[in-house]
Image (tube, rainbow, N blue to C red):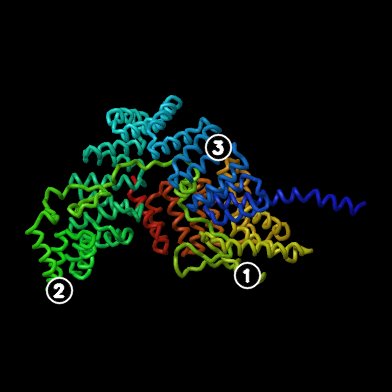
């Protein structure tokens, strides 16, 4: 009878245990998702889907991870599965709609937003995205109808009037478009997109000075919109502000290194100011992107001709002439190159073709160059060799909208707010913060490695790299191996170091909740190991950030985290990394004064700790001690953290 009840209890406990494991896997996966470790998060969600494919949540979260990896097809498929399991969640349709937008499937995206709005009719973002899809699909009548409904429901939302203006502008009704735009700017004069629409109207009317002023306002409000810099450069070029135009193209390329228009037009500007070699670099880049771009090839030919690379020029002239056999100007330039190289026969062949064309002009096409053409601009799709030296503009001036979705950008926004270098942590991964020939050593960690001889050597690292799929599987296998050994231990006090090893493995795979549990179990057997308090404090700090994002009160967790840092510092007073990490934690609580003291202590213990200088510099700037902060950032740059120099520039220029 006793044996029967024992077996019954075990059987009854199995579902609860399995559910507990699923919940922990889901928590670990969502934590990895929050910290942008998308490949790792997918591995967690895969395990849950394999065990319980009928839960919609793992499909949904895996779709988010795939979306952030630009796997829009995979994300859409996962959304399909999630919707099949639970068709009443508006966020599922929203995510699938955004995926379809990225795949240019605007009609299908509209259908998704119809369903999302059905379940969440008061969500302005869903209405906004649906209208943007209508505009992209050129369904202006439906867009107008929906905008009318939005204006009635949300009268004070400037975006609705701005979109209304844009739709009217696309229908060539610039008078009413201007009226709606005035209303949008009256409601919100700080809307960068509204100023961009106003500038597009000015560009279409060739009112360059007005466009320059309006785009300057748009750039001030939205400094990362590449298209605004390209369009302002075009406006500045036409009012002879060449230096400003060049600066705008430079900035556009800094924001989008593969932008065709920025590279092409910067090359043309460089030609005008005599910067031939760097113009060649730009045309090389364009031709690498578009090997058959005849206009770029001809421009590069002229520059190679001018700089003395005659054979390179002939190669490019030949490619253009093969494409346009009656392009006599190309033949003339190639003939001159042949003569300079002493290739008289080939030069005479080209010159004879030109002579025949002059005698029979109606058979050929003879371009005429004039100074009046210098300020003209061709459309991107206009392939006219007569316009080889003109700047290029897009076929249609369009406003690039940001779709109202939390799936792309929320993590990036968090990174902008949190500019500090991350914490040091125990890991199996090597030190990797971008600097060379530097190893983070801590005597306590080295002593642990010598004494306990872990399966893998434990390191101290900062900002560890993201795991790929194979590495993730290897660390999961390590966790399973350690779990197998731990399950057979009868006296945990003798083998407690295995708990630390597994906690570190859990930390590497961002399963911080499991790592905290293992470290807590270790500390129940040994309260003298500083590394355990330190690692638990770091894991709790990481969980704290994630928990805050879920809108949960974290005061108690914050107090426990600080207590662990304090205990680690007491047990290991010479460990610079503990003081550095505690300072990072204090910074996250906006306690800059105490954080600066801890960074200072860390620097005293380890004068080469570049991250401590970097973070102390930022903390001092936030504490209104700008000069001292810039001095610290300078020292961080000197020690190899070269990002410090861009931060110095940012804050030095900031008024």
User: Can you tell which quarter of the image residue 638 is in?
Assistant: bottom left
Q: Is residue 386 left or right of residue 528?
A: left
Tell me the crowding category of disc 2: few under 14, some 14 to 19, or many 20 or more residues within 10 angstroms, Cα based: few
Residue position marked by numbered label 1 in the rendering? 449
* Earlier-in-chain disc, 1 versus 2: 2
Please state the horizontal and vertical placement of residue 653, each as a whole percent of the image.
32, 49
Q: Which mark is residue 90?
A: 3
User: Can you tell which quarter of the image residue 333 is in?
Assistant: bottom left
User: In terms of secondary structure, where does tag 3 sit?
Assistant: helix
Name the one closer to the observer, 211 or 655: 211
Query: How far is mark 3 from mark 1, CA to CA?
Result: 51 Å
Q: Is residue 590 left or right of residue 177?
A: right
User: Can you tell which quarter of the image residue 449 is in?
Assistant: bottom right
* Earlier-in-chain disc, 3 versus 2: 3
Tell me the crowding category of disc 1: few under 14, some 14 to 19, or many 20 or more residues within 10 angstroms, Cα based: some
Query: How far is mark 1 from mark 2, CA to CA?
Result: 70 Å
Tell me the crowding category of disc 3: few under 14, some 14 to 19, or many 20 or more residues within 10 angstroms, Cα based: many
Q: Which mark is residue 341?
A: 2
User: In terms of secondary structure, where does tag 2 sit?
Assistant: loop
From the image, state whether disc 3 or disc 1 is nearer to you.
Answer: 3
Name the one closer to the observer, 8 or 254: 8
Please state the horizontal and vertical placement of residue 146, each as a whole percent of the image.
43, 30
Q: Which mark is residue 641?
A: none
Is the C-beta separation of discs 3 and 2 under 8 Å?
A: no
Residue 432 seen: yes
From the image, state whether disc 1 or disc 2 is nearer to you.
Answer: 2
């Amino acid at each position: 009878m006793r044996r029967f009840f024992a077996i019954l209890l075990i059987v009854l406990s199995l579902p609860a245990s399995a559910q507990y494991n699923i919940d922990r896997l889901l928590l670990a996966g969502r934590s990895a998702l929050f910290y942008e470790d998308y490949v790792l998060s997918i591995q967690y969600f895969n395990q849950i889907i394999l065990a319980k494919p009928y839960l919609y949540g793992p499909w949904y979260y895996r779709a988010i991870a795939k979306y952030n990896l630009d796997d829009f097809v995979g994300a859409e498929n996962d959304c399909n599965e999630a919707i099949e399991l639970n068709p009443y969640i508006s966020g599922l349709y929203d995510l699938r709609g955004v995926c379809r937008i990225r795949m240019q499937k605007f009609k299908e995206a509209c259908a998704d937003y119809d369903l999302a709005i059905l379940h969440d009719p008061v969500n302005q973002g869903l209405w906004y995205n649906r209208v943007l899809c209508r505009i992209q699909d050129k369904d202006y009548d439906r867009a107008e109808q929906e905008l009318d409904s939005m204006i009635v429901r949300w009268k004070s939302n400037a975006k609705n009037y701005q979109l209304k203006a844009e739709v009217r502008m696309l229908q060539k009704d610039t008078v009413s478009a201007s009226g709606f735009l005035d209303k949008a700017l009256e409601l919100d004069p700080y809307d960068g997109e509204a100023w961009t629409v106003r500038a597009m109207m000015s560009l279409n009317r060739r009112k360059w000075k007005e466009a320059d002023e309006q785009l300057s306002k748009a750039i001030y409000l939205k400094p990362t919109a590449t298209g605004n810099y390209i369009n302002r450069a075009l406006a500045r070029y036409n009012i002879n502000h060449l230096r400003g135009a060049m600066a705008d193209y430079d900035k556009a390329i800094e924001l989008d290194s593969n932008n065709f228009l920025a590279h092409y037009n910067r090359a043309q500007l460089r030609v005008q100011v005599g910067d031939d070699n760097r113009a060649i670099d730009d045309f090389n880049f364009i031709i690498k992107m578009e090997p058959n771009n005849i206009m770029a090839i001809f421009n590069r030919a002229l520059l190679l001709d001018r700089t003395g690379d005659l054979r390179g020029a002939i190669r490019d002239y030949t490619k253009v002439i093969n494409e346009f056999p009656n392009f006599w100007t190309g033949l003339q330039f190639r003939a001159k190159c042949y003569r300079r190289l002493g290739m008289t026969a080939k030069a005479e062949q080209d010159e004879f073709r030109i002579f025949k064309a002059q005698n029979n002009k109606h058979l050929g096409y003879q371009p005429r160059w004039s100074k009046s053409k210098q300020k003209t601009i061709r459309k991107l799709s206009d392939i006219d060799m007569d316009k080889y030296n003109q700047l290029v503009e897009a076929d249609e001036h369009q406003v690039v909208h940001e779709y109202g979705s939390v799936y792309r950008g929320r993590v990036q926004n968090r990174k902008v707010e949190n500019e500090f270098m991350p914490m040091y942590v125990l890991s199996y991964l090597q030190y990797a913060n971008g600097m060379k020939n530097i190893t983070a050593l801590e005597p306590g960690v080295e002593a642990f490695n010598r004494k306990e001889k872990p399966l893998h050597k434990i390191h101290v690292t900062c900002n560890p790299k993201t795991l790929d799929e194979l590495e993730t599987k290897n660390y999961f296998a390590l966790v399973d191996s350690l779990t197998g050994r731990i399950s057979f231990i009868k006296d945990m006090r003798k083998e407690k170091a295995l708990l630390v090893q597994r906690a570190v493995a859990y930390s590497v795979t961002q399963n911080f909740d499991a790592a905290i549990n293992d470290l807590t179990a270790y500390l129940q057997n040994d309260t003298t190991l500083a590394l355990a308090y330190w690692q638990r404090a770091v894991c709790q700090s990481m969980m704290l950030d994630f928990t805050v994002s879920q809108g949960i009160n974290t005061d108690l967790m914050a107090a426990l985290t600080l207590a662990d840092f304090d205990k680690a510092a007491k047990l290991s007073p010479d460990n610079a990394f503990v003081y550095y990490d505690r300072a990072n934690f204090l910074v996250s609580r906006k306690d800059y004064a105490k954080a600066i003291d801890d960074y200072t202590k860390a620097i005293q213990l380890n004068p080469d700790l570049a991250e401590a200088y970097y973070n102390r510099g930022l903390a001092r700037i936030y504490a209104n001690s700008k000069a001292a902060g810039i001095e610290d950032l300078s020292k961080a740059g000197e020690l190899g953290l070269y990002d410090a120099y861009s931060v110095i520039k940012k804050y030095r220029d900031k008024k």
